[in-house]
Image (tube, rainbow, N blue to C red):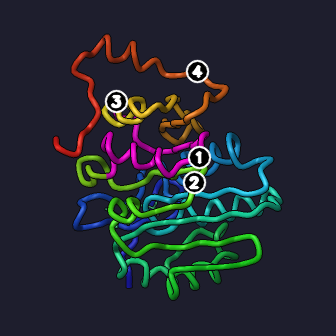
Amino acid sequence: MLKTTLSGDGSRTLYCEAAGEHYHSTKDGAFSEALYKHVLPAWQYRIAGRSTVTVLDICFGLGYNTLVLIWYLRQQGYAGRLQIFSPEHDLKLLQGLADFPYPEELAALSPIMKKLAENLACREADLAIEIIPTEARSWLKQFKSSVDIVFHDPFSPARNRQLWTYEYFAELRRIGSDDLLLTTYSTATAVRMGLFENGFHLYENRPAAKVRSATLASLTPLPLNEIDMVLKQQRNPAAASLRDSG
Ligand SMILES: C[S@@+](CC[C@H](N)C(=O)[O-])C[C@H]1O[C@@H](n2cnc3c(N)ncnc32)[C@H](O)[C@@H]1O
């Protein structure tokens, strides 16, 4: 039986002993993080009005980002095709998720979660989800599809450094569409520098009053106030991206 933690919005998350971190902000809440930091900006700036969308969900974890996206698109009556790829190296975690106590909003999605826990895949008329049970960075190197949106949600740079470096973001650019949008909870300057140096425009994602700010990075400009990364660097010459070799 998984020992869950009640998070700030009433939804449940887990604590990862190996990483020494929870899977979600216990203050903001697991469901709210997925909705406000990832799904709503993806909907607003990319998905609405498009007939097909491909999302890279890094990493699957408890699957909140994927499930809340499907839930929200159904709420909106989205009739397009959704494809999700999601690497996750913890197979034992995935196998235990069929019985995870997700919040009421996600109850109707339990058949999808069961298929994912059993087969690491789910294919329906306009929905295809594939979980890739391996290390994300090495898998990305041979990934050939083009993605429109990246939900970037590994553990913190202190724990998952290889998924926050300049070189890693360059890899995302290679597999991203020309207007790739990346959403992440991190607001760290080093993370934003790595994205900026790869040609992304950077924006503060200020969601609801109860959820802390996050970051939006887009290869095309968004109708928001752009963060002036050149000015940031002038004011703090020590500001630098994380590097693989660092
Ligand atoms: C913060 S949790 C993700 C939460 C998830 N997005 C959700 O909505 O529930 C981070 C996840 O990344 C996975 N992970 C960490 N490093 C990884 C790597 N290099 N490759 C694949 N998965 C990784 C961990 O096992 C963990 O499940």
Please name the residue that numbered disc 4 is placed on.
Answer: 225
Q: Is mark 1 within 8 Å of ligand 1?
A: no
The secondary structure type at the circle numbered 4 is loop
Q: Residue furthest left?
A: 246
Q: CA distance from mark 1 to mark 2?
A: 6 Å
Quick one: label 1 or label 4, which is nearer the N terminus? 1
- Whether residues under marks 3 and 4 lie with C-beta atoms below 8 angstroms apart, the answer is no
Q: Where in the figure is residue 21, as x and y percent of width and height?
A: 29, 58
Q: Is residue 129 magenta?
A: no
Whichever of callouts 1 and 2 sits on the residue coming sooner in the sequence is 2
Quadrant into which the N terminus falls: bottom left
Which comes before the other along the chain, label 3 or label 2? 2
Q: Give, as a single range, the part of the protein colored magenta.
A: 163-189
* Residue type, label 2: Val
Distance between the alpha carbons at the discs numbered 1 and 4? 23 Å
Q: Amino acid at mark 4?
A: Asn
- Image quarter for ligand 1 equals bottom left
Counting residues from the start of the chain, the first of labels 2 and 4 encountered is 2
Q: Which residue is mark 1?
A: 177
- Which of the numbered marks, if any, corresponds to residue 185? none
Q: Amino acid at mark 3?
A: Thr
Sort mark 2 into few (<14), some (14-19) or many (20+) by Cα contacts within 10 Å.
Answer: many
> At 21% from the left edge and 21% from the top edge, which residue is drawn?
238
Q: Residue at x 70, y 42 (%)?
A: 44
- Precedes in sequence: disc 3 or disc 4: 3
Residue indicated by mark 2: 147
* Residue at the spot 33% in from the left edge and 67% down from the top edge: 135
Which disc number belongs to residue 189? 3
Q: Position of residue 53 (x, y in %)?
A: 68, 56
